């Protein structure tokens, strides 16, 4: 067996090559640090609705004027702040997503990066020995990690969930729509269903610490009377047979891995009424795993953060769902990072 010859770089190629892209990768962490600093210092919130000089912003934020001005110039270069003379104001993106108190605020998700970074910095160790930094697929670790963060994810997920609720063609009685939300988190996915279908009654399952946060979110939405919460491990909690018209599984499978996902699908099939619908939301790489890049990066995140997790292709999901006896497995595009997966249990929903 012969090996392929090593690719050589021609003099013409060498003259065109620069290490700029490598240097950008090498220093990419600095952008995260800038965003973290802006959120921690509440600079975006202090700038909301007004134009301030660097000195005025420093007085409001309790920072030093000189360093604040240098920091603001970086935010301008990043497109988060705009400058006019000596004053600075928020760019549209920062105004929408980085101002505290707005329903679209994503600063909490930014702060979560502090706890994700140590795992990424041990990626070399995981590749070398095959051991993750931690296992977010186990209940105790998952509860401690996600409970403080699930509400921060609500603004990111909810708009997608609203589009899902509009796009789904749910067949059920106009007076009874039983919905099961597995690994419910903040309840964003089922809340959109509850708002769209006034007859919907939600059973939401998640770990006790996470349920406490989900309850608060749903209460603030005025939907508490439509929910029954089960504080339990969704992978072992008994599910009543032939009960639900709709089951939702959002961003869980990549954490728990293939073995437990397949078992979960079998249990969900039994819990659905004939004609019931299952919706799976996750991040799907292409079938040949050549991209998109963010899905491949998430796959590495699962490598360092879980023992069995990874990202799965639509074809892999479809195979498991068909094996669990689901029918009509297809993708539903709702303008999300990845399409949703929809499957149906045979029969007529009642």
Image (tube, rainbow, N blue to C red):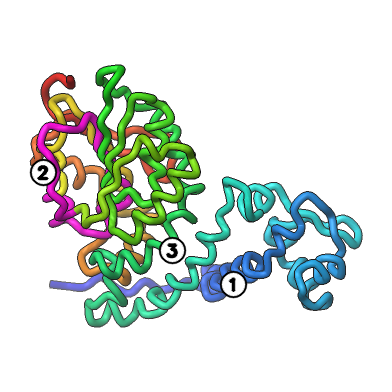
Secondary structure beneath label 2: helix
Q: How many marks?
A: 3
Left or right position of 307 against 191: left
Residue 266's label in the rendered image is: 2
> Mark 1 sits on what residue?
33
Across and down, in percent, residue 63 comes to: 77, 75
- Residue plotted at (15% across, 44% down): 265
Q: Which residues are magenta?
A: 235-263
Q: Tell me the distance, in whole angstroms, between the alpha carbons under discs 3 and 1.
A: 21 Å
> Mark 3 sits on what residue?
148
Query: Can residue 288 be spotted in the picture?
Result: no
- Residue plotted at (21% across, 57% down): 233
Near-viewer residue (106 or 336): 106
Q: Tell me the distance, in whole angstroms, between the alpha carbons under discs 2 and 3.
A: 31 Å
Q: Tell me the distance, in whole angstroms, between the alpha carbons under discs 2 and 1.
A: 43 Å
> Could you tell which of marks 3 and 1 lies nearer the N-terminus?
1
Secondary structure beneath label 1: helix
- Residue plotted at (30% across, 32% down): 201
């Amino acid at each position: 067996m012969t090996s392929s010859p090593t690719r050589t770089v021609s003099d013409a190629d060498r003259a065109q090559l620069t290490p700029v892209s490598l240097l950008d990768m090498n220093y990419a962490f600095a952008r995260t640090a800038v965003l973290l600093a802006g959120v921690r210092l509440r600079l975006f919130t202090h700038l909301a609705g007004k134009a301030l000089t660097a000195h005025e912003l420093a007085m409001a934020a309790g920072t030093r004027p000189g360093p604040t001005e240098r920091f603001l110039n970086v935010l301008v270069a990043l497109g988060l702040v705009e400058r006019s003379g000596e004053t600075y104001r928020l760019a549209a993106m920062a105004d929408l997503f980085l101002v505290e108190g707005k329903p679209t605020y994503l600063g909490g998700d930014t702060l979560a990066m502090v706890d994700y970074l140590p795992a990424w910095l041990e990626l070399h160790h995981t590749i070398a020995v095959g051991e993750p930094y931690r296992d977010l697929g186990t209940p105790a670790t998952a509860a401690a990690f996600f409970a403080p963060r699930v509400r921060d994810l609500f603004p990111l997920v909810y708009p997608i969930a609203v589009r899902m609720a509009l796009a789904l063609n749910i067949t059920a009685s106009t007076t009874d729509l039983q919905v099961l939300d597995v690994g419910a988190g903040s309840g964003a996915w089922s809340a959109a269903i509850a708002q769209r279908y006034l007859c919907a009654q939600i059973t939401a399952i998640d770990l006790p610490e996470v349920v406490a946060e989900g309850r608060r979110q749903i209460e603030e939405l005025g939907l508490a009377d439509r929910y029954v919460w089960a504080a339990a491990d969704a992978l072992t909690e008994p599910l009543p047979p032939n009960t639900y018209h709709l089951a939702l599984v959002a961003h869980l499978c990549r954490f728990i891995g293939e073995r437990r996902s397949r078992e979960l699908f079998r249990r969900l099939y039994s819990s659905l009424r004939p004609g019931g619908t299952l919706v799976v939301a996750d991040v799907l790489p292409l079938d040949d795993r050549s991209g998109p890049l963010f899905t491949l990066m998430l796959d590495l995140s699962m490598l360092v953060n879980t023992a069995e997790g990874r990202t799965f292709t639509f074809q892999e999901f479809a195979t498991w769902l068909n094996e669990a006896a689901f029918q009509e497995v297809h993708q539903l595009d709702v303008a999300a990072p990845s399409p949703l997966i929809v499957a149906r249990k045979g029969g007529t929903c009642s």
